[in-house]
Image (cartoon, helix red, strand yellow):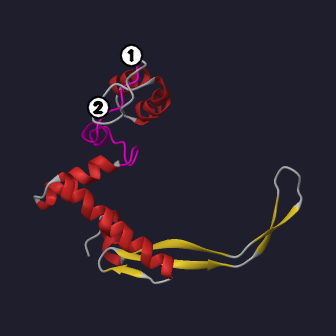
Amino acid sequence: MSATVTYARKGKWVAPGWVACAAWLGHHAQSGSSALQARNGYVPDAETRHAAGIQQAMKMNRKERVAALADKTGSTKVDAERNIAALLEIIRSSLKKGDDVALIGFGSFEVRKRAARTGRNPKTGEALKIKATRVPAFKAGATLKAAVSGARK
């Protein structure tokens, strides 16, 4: 295995930094061959992970999201990337203004206010004043919850 290989997608051989992740995947797989491959630095692709019973071990990266959108809509990858960027910018700017964003059937993004509070430095135990802040939050819709749980909605 070459240490110069740096990708970790689609069943490729990966750099030593990913071997720990691959070993975890192999450890949680049900077959011994997956564990052997993982110890050697092999990260299985999504279909292999699903067949081995490994759920949510690795996330879809930006390129995979763009390719999936382009394939689903029949557009080019450039157009798909532009559409994703535009949607994220709309959500970001709306939240920055304090507006909520509702995607019917999916969920809603909102801004929640956190009050000022007193915290503690874990190392010294010293009391700290934590300022009030606004944080983004996502609340899944009923349709999304049902799809994830396997129930019909």
Residue 101 bears which disc, if any?
none
Residue 38 appears left or right of 131: left
- For the stretch drawn in magenta, the main secondary structure is loop
Magenta region includes residue 143: no
Q: Looking at the image, which residue is at 46% across and 30% down?
A: 18
In the rendered image, which quarter is residue 109 located in?
Answer: bottom left
Give the magenta range.
40-59
Q: Which residue is mark 2?
A: 11
Q: Looking at the image, can residue 26 be seen? A: yes
| Above or below 48: residue 14 | above
Q: Residue at x 43, y 22 (%)?
A: 39
Residue 76: image location, x then y, percent? 14, 54
For residue 60, above or below residue 147: above
What is the residue that sits farthest to the top in this orientation?
A: 1
- Which residue position holds label 1? 2
Q: Nearer the viewer, mark 1 or mark 2?
A: 1
The residue shown at (35%, 64%) is 149
Amino acid type of the residue tagged 1 in the rendering = Ser
Q: Is residue 51 magenta?
A: yes
Q: Secondary structure at mark 1?
A: loop
Q: Quadrant of residue 7?
A: top left
Q: Tag 2: Cα neighbours inside 10 Å, few (<14), some, or many (≥20)?
A: some
Q: Is residue 109 visible in the rendered structure shown here?
A: no
Q: Pick whichever, 122 or 134, lies toward us.
A: 134
- Residue 131: image location, x then y, percent: 74, 72
Image coordinates for residue 6, horizontal then vertical, percent: 39, 29
Q: Where in the figure is residue 144, as x and y percent of width and height?
A: 33, 70
Question: In screen coordinates, is 96 left or right of 4?
Answer: right
The tag earlier along the polypeptide, 1 or 2, is 1
Q: Point out the image quarter for the C terminus.
A: bottom left
Quarter of the rendering occupied by the N terminus: top left
Query: Looking at the rendering, which quadrant does residue 41 occupy?
Result: top left
